[in-house]
Amino acid sequence: MKVLVIGSGGREHAITWKIKQNPEVTELYCAPGNAGINEIAIGVDIKADDVEGLLNFVKENNITLTVVGPEVPLEKGIVDLFNENGLLIFGPQKSAARLEHSKMFAKDFMKRHNIPTAAYETFSFNDKAKVFDYISNTGYPIVIKADGLAAGKGVIICSNIDEAIQTVTELFDDKIFGSAGDNIVIEQFLQGVEASVFAICDGTDYIVLPASQDHKKIGEGETGKNTGGMGAYAPADKAVTPAIMKSIRTKVIEPVLKFMKSEGNEFKGCLYCGLMIDKTGEPFVIEFNTRFGDPETQVVLPLINSDITEMFIASASGKIKDYELKLNNNFCCTVVLASDGYPDKYETGKEITGLNEAGGDAIVFHAGTKNENGKILSAGGRVLSVTGISALGLKEAINIAYHNAANMNFENKYNRTDIGLKGL
Ligand code: AMP
Ligand code: GLY
């Protein structure tokens, strides 16, 4: 079997690492990959959003299965294009990927089908008077979201009218997210405990993977700006008890699959449910993503014992019911090592040392790294994702992650010191 993974982050390193465990995979490629991925897969110099280039590569090299990591190629219709060419690919078609790349589509869909989510209004930049009228008369806090893709940064929580005016001005006038901010959603601020749940779907049926918790804010104790994610742990079985998981299945995942299908937007691939669980245990959807989460993937995939290549094929070919998911009893924690300054401006090109010192129960997933003449250099905001694994408990997994993270160094390294603590 020949497999291509698309993407270049910690998530794709984890996916590649897991696929690599299948002895039937004789050739494993990653486009474009990073320094860590390229140690276990053949790097292909094609960008993740060059869907035509990827199609040509897959045809020329007779790739059996393509696995899409990030959201942008999904929005560009890579799955539709591959399907038209009779190629096997893991992910949703463009119309179904709107659950992620259009927050308005997702919110309207949830409203139509009574899927629990925060109350909201939508506004267009053509109608500024309406939005200013709304933010002058609403209660606070409110959450303002760019409709389109904004690399995980398009959500701004405003605690008063001044912040709301500033945010709307930045989105509509300064166009900080380009056309992704031409339409906005303003929604009610939800309180509770956040969790991420991945459902692997085949259009009709699905399986769920163990729940996890991300740490989205840059600062300790969930303070400061939103990031792509500064660390995660799994399983999050205190936040998502079996009873809560049942509600998530029946109130969120099952209606999504049923109504996406009946509306002609059959959902295949990974449905990422970003949830707020309120104090009575009711789940509310904060957002959907239509791909695996990063860094959640780095703590969820090590909990799976069964083969994920078969899981991807079962999803893509409508046979997820036949896939037997086997889990182990481990606990995982991943700590993201970032470039100081992230999620704003940061420097790259710093040499990373200590990579070879990772101990047996830790896996160092590379995120923004590159290999330059044998030296491993930082090449992004999130640089490494150090995962600790333990059968003994979450506390041990956290200790392993931090112990190993301390051995990895580069100039201006930044990490949170409280990853996983909320799960203890
Ligand atoms: P999103 O990109 O939609 O997941 O939003 C990023 C983060 O903003 C979430 O993980 C939450 O921490 C926060 N957030 C988004 N929407 C809401 C909401 N309606 N209420 C409270 N927090 C929210
Ligand atoms: N960890 C958040 C995301 O992948 O969107």
Image (tube, rainbow, N blue to C red):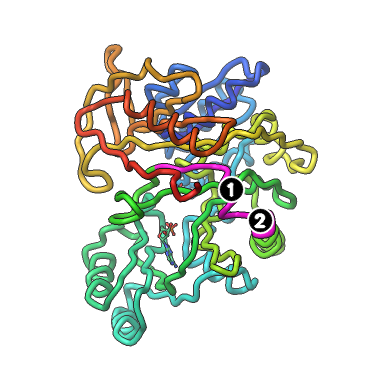
Given the image, on which type of amino acid does mark 1 rest? Ala
Q: Could you say whether the residue bearing mark 1 is in a helix, strand or loop? A: loop
* Count of marks placed on residues: 2
Relative to 16, is 403 on the left or the right? left
98 or 34: which is nearer to us?
34
Are dots 2 and 1 in contact, CB under 8 Å? yes
Residue 236 in magenta stretch: yes
Relative to 205, is 132 on the left or the right? left
How far apart in space, not on screen, are marks 2 and 1 (Cα)? 9 Å
Label 1 sits on residue = 211
Q: Could you say whether the residue bearing mark 2 is in a helix, strand or loop? A: helix
Label 2 sits on residue = 245
Could you tell which of marks 2 and 1 lies nearer the N-terminus?
A: 1
Residue numbers of the magenta segment? 231-245
Relative to 100, is 204 on the left or the right? right
223 or 63: which is nearer to us?
223
Q: Residue at x 39, y 51 (%)?
A: 216
**Res. 52 visible in picture:** no
Residue positioned most to the top:
374
- Residue 51 in the image: state x and y as whole percent: 47, 38
